[in-house]
Image: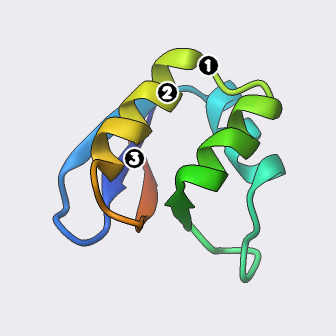
Amino acid sequence: MIELHDRETGALIASIGEEELAILVAALEEESGDDQDYYIDSATLHLLADAGAPQDLLRLLGQALGEREGMDVVWIRRE
């Protein structure tokens, strides 16, 4: 299981599976091979939708984003 957290607040956004993580990794830019965070804004949500991200994940990310222009999301793999 992989947890997505709001980097600013530490709040849990969603728990996702390997398939959803693969979509994030493929669609979003990583600064290095061990990078585990992504900048999310409304344009990113559209990009993820085009990449086939599940609607539930897009909804949860959109809710976490709220009225902010953007946010950093960090993922953590849990056993």
Q: Is residue 40 above or below residue 21?
A: below
Please state the horizontal and vertical placement of residue 19, each as a whole percent of the image: 70, 26
Q: Quadrant of the C terminus?
A: top left
| Residue that mark 1 sits on | 54
Q: Do the residues bearing badges 2 and 1 touch, measured as CB atoms within 8 Å?
A: yes
Query: Within 10 angstroms of label 2, few (less than 14), some, or many (20 or more) residues?
Result: some
Dot in front, 2 or 3: 2
Q: Quadrant of residue 22?
A: top right
Query: Within 10 angstroms of label 1, few (less than 14), some, or many (20 or more) residues?
Result: few
* Secondary structure category for the residue under label 1: loop
| In this picture, residue 73 sits left or right of residue 46 | left
Sequence-wise, the earlier of marks 1 and 3 is 3
Residue type indicated by callout 1: Pro
The residue under the point 77% across, 24% down is: 52
Please state the horizontal and vertical placement of residue 6, each as a whole percent of the image: 30, 58
* Secondary structure category for the residue under label 2: helix
Q: Do the residues bearing badges 1 and 3 touch, measured as CB atoms within 8 Å?
A: no
| In this picture, residue 12 sits left or right of residue 52 | left
Please state the horizontal and vertical placement of residue 67, each as a whole percent of the image: 28, 54
| Residue that mark 2 sits on | 57
The residue under the point 52% across, 59% down is: 40
Q: CA distance from mark 1 to mark 3?
A: 14 Å
The residue under the point 37% across, 31% down is: 60
* Secondary structure category for the residue under label 3: strand
Residue type indicated by callout 3: Leu
| Residue that mark 3 sits on | 4
Q: CA distance from mark 2 to mark 3?
A: 10 Å
Please state the horizontal and vertical placement of residue 66, each as a whole percent of the image: 28, 48
Sequence-wise, the earlier of marks 2 and 3 is 3
The residue under the point 74% across, 37% down is: 23
Q: CA distance from mark 2 to mark 1?
A: 5 Å
Which residue, as the protein is rendered here, is positioned at the far top? 55
